[in-house]
Amino acid sequence: MNNLDLITNFIKKTPKSELHLHIEGSLEPELMFKLSKRNKIDIAFNSVDEIRAAYNFSNLDSFLKIYYEGSNVLITEEDFFDLTWEYVLRCKKDNIVHTEIFFDPQSHLERGVKFDDVINGIHNALKKGHSEFGITSKIIMCFLRHLDEEPCFKVLNHALRHKDKIIGVGLDSSEKGNPPKKFERLFNAAIKENFLTVAHAGEEGPPEYIWDSINILKVKRIDHGVQCLKDEKLVETLKEKNIPLTVCPLSNIKLCVFDKLENHNLKKMLNKGLRVMVNSDDPAYFGGYLNTNLIETSKALNLDLDEVKVLIQNSFKSSFLDENSKNNWLSKI
Ligand code: ADE
Ligand code: ZN
């Protein structure tokens, strides 16, 4: 067996964790088409092939436009259950034993969808995933940073009724021009309510947004963070504080953050001792779930088995699992 086959086999058979997955980004064209018919929602495409053909992006914003359009077919609790259940089946296939997923309530509330239908559909599918396959999970509610801070407080109030299901809050959507400090009051309020905080930062935006996510939003993890290498002091701080960076290699290529996977800076980040791991972000749009991300990245960056192991270990270490569960999984890698 050559080294690449060995690493591929290792990736497939090892229990893994995923920490950066937008559930709306796991909406496959087939399900989008089915739901558009079920809910009588017009979409701009006549076939599954047409949908797939439209997935060519030049940057984050060009993707978000299509991503929010796709989300329009999600209406009922059953839709959110079906969406999440499909992702759970992917987890089973990829040997993901723990997952922490994002959802974007604001993109649904503005269409008249009920918050409770969104969260209950997602939660019930994850619960079934636990009882049928033993897959554990956490739910993180993201605020859309292109919107104003004030209306987000209403969304936070919804989350208060579902504290048993939502572990933390995050920040996503269009990064450039929407700095973390825009959401300082909101994140302070969320922290007061004992929600953990994370934020997308340094995906396209500057290192300053990573600093501000740490210092102002008090995040436990940075989502993406690949722009951190532009600032040596920031790298030192991320290392000192052991702040995880949930990197998403195929996403970064699809959104033109790097021109090709061979030029991705994940290996550099790893070699600097940063706590990085691999995630799929919006797998239905970016061409691969977790195993594909890990396999393609290992190949392109020539990662050795020890480096792949560290990535998988980092994912469990950086999760919001309790220490016993973390150690239990770490002992199996
Ligand atoms: N929402 C879904 N995917 C995203 C990404 N990669 N960056 C910011 N917001 C997102
Ligand atoms: Zn993301």
Image: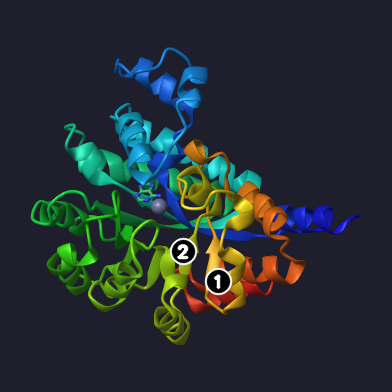
Residue with the mark numbered 2 = 226
Three-letter amino acid code at disc 2?
A: Val
Q: In this view, does 320 lie above or below 291?
A: below
Task: Answer whether labels 2 and 1 touch (C-beta < 8 Å).
Answer: yes
Q: In this view, does 145 lie to the left or right of 9?
A: left
Q: In this view, does 70 lie to the left or right of 181?
A: right
The answer to which quarter of the image holds residue 140 is: bottom left
Q: In this view, does 192 lie above or below 174?
A: below
Binning the other alpha carbons within 10 Å of mark 2 as few (below 14), some (14 to 19) or many (20 upward) gives: many
Callout count: 2
Foreground residue among 318 and 80:
318
Foreground residue among 39 and 254:
254
Residue with the mark numbered 1 = 269
Q: In which quarter of the image is the C terminus?
A: bottom right
Q: Residue furthest top?
A: 46
Residue shown at 37% from the left, 73% from the top: 220
Q: In this view, does 260 lie above or below 247?
A: above
